[in-house]
Amino acid sequence: MAISRRRFLKSTAATAALGGHTLMARAQPPARIKIDEPFHGAVLHARLGKPVPGGLKIQVTGTAPAGVAVKVQGKAAARQGDRFTADVVLRDQETDIVATAPGAGGPEETRVRVVWDRNSFPRYRFSIDDNSFFLRDLHQKQHKSLFDCFYLKMLRDLNAKYGVKFTLNIYYTTDDGFDISQLSTRWKGQFRDNADWMRLAFHAYANMPNRPYQSAPPEKLCADFDKVVAEIHRFAGKEAYAPPTVIHWGMTLHESFKPLYERGVRALSGFFERNRSGKFDVNYRWDDEHSEWLSRHDAFKDFQSGIVFSKVDIVVNGTKLDQIVPKLKPVADDPNKNEIMDLFTHEQYFWPFYHNYLPDHPERMDKAIRFVTERGYKPVFLHEGLLGAPA
């Protein structure tokens, strides 16, 4: 699991650096100095600092014993009781922030690494999970056009109205014998021609079992991933493919992160909220420290894998029509959450034969997209650049 960002370097001869953190030798006493903010891996932008020529000024805060002289990036920090503060200007996309203080056994040091989203702008993405029914519909009815399928026509109409972009996360197979290897290539040109706003991505091999990759070895996840991607390339073309930003149920072993990155995954979204038992869930098995922080922020980067993790802001199918705006407005008003609006829903609720069919699902979609559009958010694909902004 995740390594605590609060470990510190007591002596370079007695420690080993690991993933931007520092690992303390067993014989060392507890850390006396730590950085509280920014969080290790935090993605920072103009809403979370002050733009200055060639950089972004941010405030660093932490704790150290009262009266101890603390330096941050080599400059004296302000002290008040056991707190210290200092201003730091970020000039690179990634910056190590280092705080030091004298100790009885020699200099003590703690550090965090942060990401500057230099080209950030207010943006939103829309991801739809569990897609399989529209693919089966295409196969069974052999529509002349993709948009003879009512579901795809609805998405195209929303794109025409708002410019919204959709990532459709798909399964390899349904539970009735259909799988995407059966799909014709007859719509390949249409998929390519609409790839500027509609992309297909791996989600899972199938809807069931639940949580298929929560404890599965990376080899299983990667085999399913490769199988789905090969079929997307075949029937829709490489232009219509996007690396996944949501793995089914949002739970994987951390050992899978690096293989996913090697397959082009740059961002993964989850809920990062506590379930009924009080445990954080749909959080890619991050520990409570990371999950709690991301429950209050847009994103953090895992430097060991290179993947940025994003918090979903709304599940449209799980939010009643009259609650769409009340759900989104507090997010849009919070500078820790409002730079990137991560919108999300599931395909099955659009289909009348589904047992939990939502007749007003298209209206819910319209209201959510209209909310972000009217507030100046621009549609992006989350896997491009840094969460949809130029890197």
Image (tube, rainbow, N blue to C red):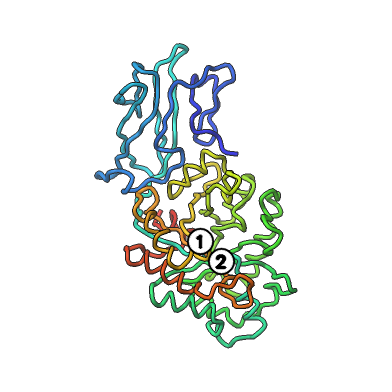
Residue 197 image offset from top left, x and y in percent: 46, 71
Marks 2 and 1 in Cβ contact (< 8 Å): yes
Residue 316 image offset from top left, x and y in percent: 49, 64
Q: Residue at x 55, y 60 (%)?
A: 243
Q: Residue furthest bottom?
A: 144
Of 154 and 196, the residue lying toward us: 154
Vertical side of 97 occupied by 189: above or below: below
Residue labelled with disc 1 = 315
Residue 58 image offset from top left, x and y in percent: 32, 39
SS under mark 1: strand
Vertical side of 295 occupied by 196: above or below: below
Residue labelled with disc 2 = 346
Of 249 and 18, the residue lying toward us: 249
Q: Residue at x 38, y 45 (%)?
A: 44
Disc 2 crowd, CA 10 A, few/some/many (<14, 14-19, 20+): some
What's under tag 2, amino acid-wise?
His
Of 171 and 11, the residue lying toward us: 171
What's under tag 1, amino acid-wise?
Val
Q: Residue furthest left?
A: 53
Vertical side of 379 occupied by 113: above or below: above
For marks 2 and 1, give the CA distance.
Answer: 8 Å
